[in-house]
Amino acid sequence: MSTSESTHPSAKALRSLINEAQFHLIFDTLSFGVCVKDLAGNILQSNKAIQKFLNYSKDELSKKNTNDVTFPEDYELTDRQLHLLKTGAQDTFSGMKRYLRKDGITVWGQYSHNLIRDPEGNPCLIFCIVEDAHHLRETQQMVELLADFPRSNPNPIFSFDAQGSLMYLNPKAKKLVESSKDPSPLSVLPPDIANIVKKSYQTEEQVSGLENSIGKIRVKHVVKAINAARLALRGDSARLCEERARKGQSGSW
């Protein structure tokens, strides 16, 4: 009795092939960068998005290690996080760092590293997601500059919240308050400053033409909403005000 063996794959094998095909389709069409690395940081698989981000082909990336595409100054950060993942001390990491493209250009990327464990629970692979963070980093740097602006500004600046409560005085503003005989910071501001601030928050409009006196000095103020989130009361330099105060002259700040 003779039998003929079927050359068609089994239903289980078909499901496996379909699942694998679906995985690769999704993997390659994701809009953000994805790669799979071993515990030593060697790149095993990469999708089109990360290939474009780093300006490498799929074959070229498969021969690269994490540090090959990392800006040298960020090696220590990468190695430290990789060590914690491969020892199983931590299962995930996220952050922002600089990547080095094939053409030598440095680009900022926001990443997430996730540890993949085998059925026994041992660390085996690292799944990495990377998104272009160039514009995000630019925004972050701008925020840092804005945050530093009041402190480094040579003019007196008073910051208020939306309710008209005084939240911050920069160094020049503190000196101005110290030069007055009243220890209250509000003593150098117009009496109705709280209501003026509230109105400026609501309308997001600059308020100018405000005046009051500090001793013999007549001062002018400007209230301005910054990014609809903070107000700064600004004037001329405290140095000029103090010089005029010593000379008994009027001035503005």
Image (spheres, rainbow, N blue to C red):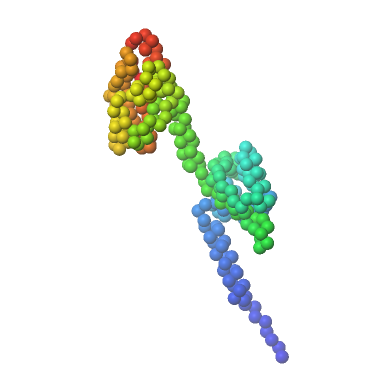
- Left or right: 44 as drawn, with respect to 150: right
Identify whether 168 is placed above or below 124: above
Residue drawn at (37%, 12%), measured in percent from left and top?
Answer: 245
Question: 206 or 58: which is nearer to us?
Answer: 206
44 sits to left or right of 242: right
Vertical side of 41 occupied by 220: above or below = above
Q: Quadrant of residue 210?
A: top left
Q: Is residue 17 visible?
A: yes
Measuring 65% from the left and 48% from the top, which residue is drawn there? Answer: 84
Determine which quarter of the picture holds residue 230. top left
Up the image or down, 142 lies above or below 31; here it is above
Q: Nearer the viewer, residue 235 or 54?
A: 235
Q: Position of residue 3 (x, y in %)?
A: 69, 86
Report if residue 226 is visible in the image: no
Which residue, as the protein is rendered here, is positioned at the far bottom?
1
Residue 1: percent from left, percent from top: 71, 91
Q: Residue at x 50, y 53 (%)?
A: 31
Quadrant of the rendering where the C terminus is positioned: top left
Q: Residue at x 59, y 65 (%)?
A: 20
> Between 179 and 20, which is closer to the camera in this rendering?
179
Q: Observer-nearest residue: 38 or 251? A: 251
The image quarter containing residue 13 is bottom right
